[in-house]
Image (cartoon, helix red, strand yellow):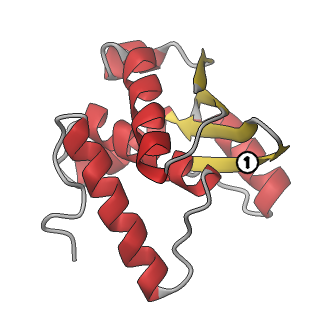
Amino acid sequence: MDVSVILAAPGWRAAVPGVERLARRAAEAALREAGRGGTITVLLAGDRELRRLNGRHRGKVKPTNVLSFPGAGGAHLGDLALALGVVRREAQANRRPARAHLAHLVAHGALHLAGHDHLHAGEARRMERAEARVMRRLGLPNPWRGAT
């Protein structure tokens, strides 16, 4: 298991102390939960970069919290990209620590790269339970507790 973290927006360090280590731990815990090995790269970027990537790859010209880009096969499972501003705003709106929200989004994206999805109700529930187990392993709150 190999998780690389690229810090493209330095504001991440002020928003989430130890951000690189936390992102790496969240991705590794998600891969263990899914029973998968392989490599993932996590890009910690700003809203402008995520807006560009979201527009190019999904046709949505706005920033989003996390994007998952599946790998071409083999050991490289894929890449994740997260937007600092969006993550901060969502954490604040949901009254959650930014570090917990970041860890949840990294785990969510890594589970996608490991084959999980949430297109149908049953799949969504399985993915939510997997995310909750990952967060518990990280010593962070269940992101779905109290969610409506």
Query: 44 or 11: which is nearer to us?
Result: 44
Please report the residue visible at 52 percent of the width from the left and 86 percent of the height from the top.
Answer: 120
Q: Position of residue 106 (x, y in %)?
A: 47, 41
Please report the residue visible at 40 percent of the width from the left and 16 percent of the height from the top.
Answer: 21
Please report the residue visible at 76 percent of the width from the left and 35 percent of the height from the top.
Answer: 76
Residue 74 falls left or right of residue 42:
right
Q: Position of residue 140 (x, y in %)?
A: 19, 39
Location of residue 144 with respect to 15 vertically, above or below: below
Residue 99 falls left or right of residue 30:
left
**Quarter placement of the C terminus:** bottom left
Please report the residue visible at 71 percent of the width from the left and 42 percent of the height from the top.
Answer: 77
Residue receiving disc 1: 69
Q: Quadrant of residue 97?
A: top left
Query: 26 or 56: which is nearer to us?
Result: 26
Residue 61 falls left or right of residue 106:
right
Q: Position of residue 92 (x, y in %)?
A: 25, 45
Q: Quadrant of residue 101?
A: top left
Residue type at mark 1: give it.
Answer: Phe
Question: Can residue 96 be seen by looking at this rendering?
Answer: yes
Location of residue 58 with respect to 1 vertically, above or below: below
Q: Position of residue 78 (x, y in %)?
A: 72, 41
Figure disc tally: 1
Q: Secondary structure at mark 1?
A: strand
Residue 67 falls left or right of residue 86:
right
